[in-house]
Image (cartoon, grey):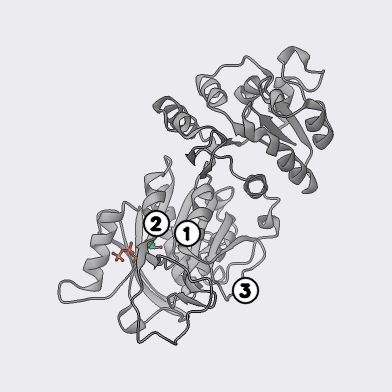
Amino acid sequence: MIVVGVSGGIAAYKTPALIRRLRQAGHEVRVIPTEAALKFVGAATLEAVSGAPAISDVFGAEPGSNHVELARTADLVVVAPATADLIARYAAGMANDLLTATLLGVKAPVVLAPAMHSAMLEHPATQANLAALRQRDVIVLESPSGALTSGDTGPGRMMEPEQIATMVLELLGSGPANRPPPKSPASTAKPQAETGPTDSTWAGHRVLVSAGGTREPLDPVRYLGNTSSGKQGLAIAVAAAGRGATVTLVGANLKLDVPDGIALVPVSTALEMSNAMAPRAATADLIVMAAAVADFRPAAVAANKIKRDGHGGFSLELVANPDILAALVEARRPGQVIIGFAAETGDRDASALEHAAAKARRKGTDLTVANDVSGGAIFGQDSTRVVLLDKVGQIVGQAEGSKSAVAEAILDAVRAMVVG
Ligand code: CTP
């Protein structure tokens, strides 16, 4: 059973769409609006879409749906929208209505979809409350930028109900990830005690992997891209799923079969990848940034195919893409492990490995998977050779062979780092 909390913001009018989507996926939903929420969305609407009473007051709750019972039986609680006031009351441990009283008793995952004016979101009090809740493993979704009800533009919009539903269903394992986990191709190559589905250290852990090469459109048919196939990222996703982890793969332009059991989020551009990674990172225990992300994109995308006529040649203006890995490291929650890749070529100044070691120190990742791609080696191939570097650029492992075998070696290094 999913508890959907609703607090009093204008975005509450979108919450019925979230409830409907969760019920369509086969979940029982109990909705708990705050009193203020009922000024934005009627109890009759919430009751009709959820199929259950919508009660705000602790004293109004019927037997079997008081805060203790709801907290005990919830598989997940999602609060959408979560206003500054609700966030403050939750962070302070208050219990002055049915929603906050329920939140205090919940052991299941809690997801907040904050929505408010940018100034309120950016206020140090709200930021401190959100940081405190994140520390307590509450999952705080992004509040995208855009037009706000006040007429201003900025961060603070509620994530779209469809996206919230996708996140919730992924968390509950009733999204695409609910399919049976794939067999790790390399799991037979190693003793069962070390790897494969019997490795209980991975069960219940969430792994988020990016793979493939982003494409930055120039016009409707052309793009700036790279030769990454996504094979190494996919091999890591498969290996982690084979060990029992719950795996989400954000795949940029993959032309590979992704086995059932891995939740694939297809993307194309760096911006799309950034938008797909950021909210999912909030729930991940391990993040592997294996994708080859374009650092720059064309400043403008031509609406029509760019014609040769009249062009003796032309210059392209590029603007910087976000550094996804840097943002993930910045938002890292305690205990989360983040792995970056460094595909380097040697030059006059330093060897490929020296460049990779410098990147390992610069990026703040826990592990850097370095490979030498001089002459285009490795991209798209079935086998590879990597050096694993820790956060100070020291070599902590090496692996060579199939991309599956290398994936297992990377996961072994993570396991050694976490378990010791
Ligand atoms: N990466 C990222 N976002 C970008 C560029 C790269 O998240 N816009 C990630 C890659 O997925 C990889 C790591 O950063 O895990 C290193 O990528 P790489 O292209 O080797 O390095 P850059 O960060 O782009 O640094 P530089 O180009 O200066 O070597």
Q: Position of residue 205 (x, y in %)?
A: 55, 49
Give the residue pinned by disc 2: 322
User: Splitting the image into 4 quarters, where does residue 164 fall?
Assistant: top right
Give how far apart the Cα atoms at labels 3 and 2 are.
28 Å
Q: Is mark 2 within 8 Å of ligand 1?
A: yes
Please rate how many residues cluster around mark 1, counting C-alpha atoms within 10 Å: few if below 14, some from 14 to 19, many from 20: some
Q: Which mark is residue 107?
A: none
Decide which of 60, 190 is in the foreground and name it.
60
Give how far apart the Cα atoms at labels 3 and 1 are.
24 Å
- Counting residues from the N terminus, which is met first, the one under dot 3 or under dot 1? 3
Q: Are marks 2 and 1 in contact (CB under 8 Å)?
A: yes
Total residue callouts? 3
Is the residue 50 above or below the residue 235 in the image?
above
Decide which of 149, 413 is in the foreground and name it.
149
**Residue at the image point whose x is 63% and y is 26% from the top:** 8
Give the residue pinned by disc 1: 271
What amino acid type should be assigned to the residue bearing mark 3? Asp
Q: Is residue 199 visible?
A: yes
Q: Position of residue 14 (x, y in %)?
A: 69, 39
Q: Quadrant of ligand 1?
A: bottom left
Point out the residue furthest to the top here. Answer: 59
- Counting residues from the N terminus, which is met first, the one under dot 2 or under dot 1? 1
Give how far apart the Cα atoms at labels 2 and 1 are.
7 Å
What amino acid type should be assigned to the residue bearing mark 2? Pro
Q: Position of residue 241 (x, y in %)?
A: 58, 60
Q: Is residue 128 left or right of residue 259?
A: left
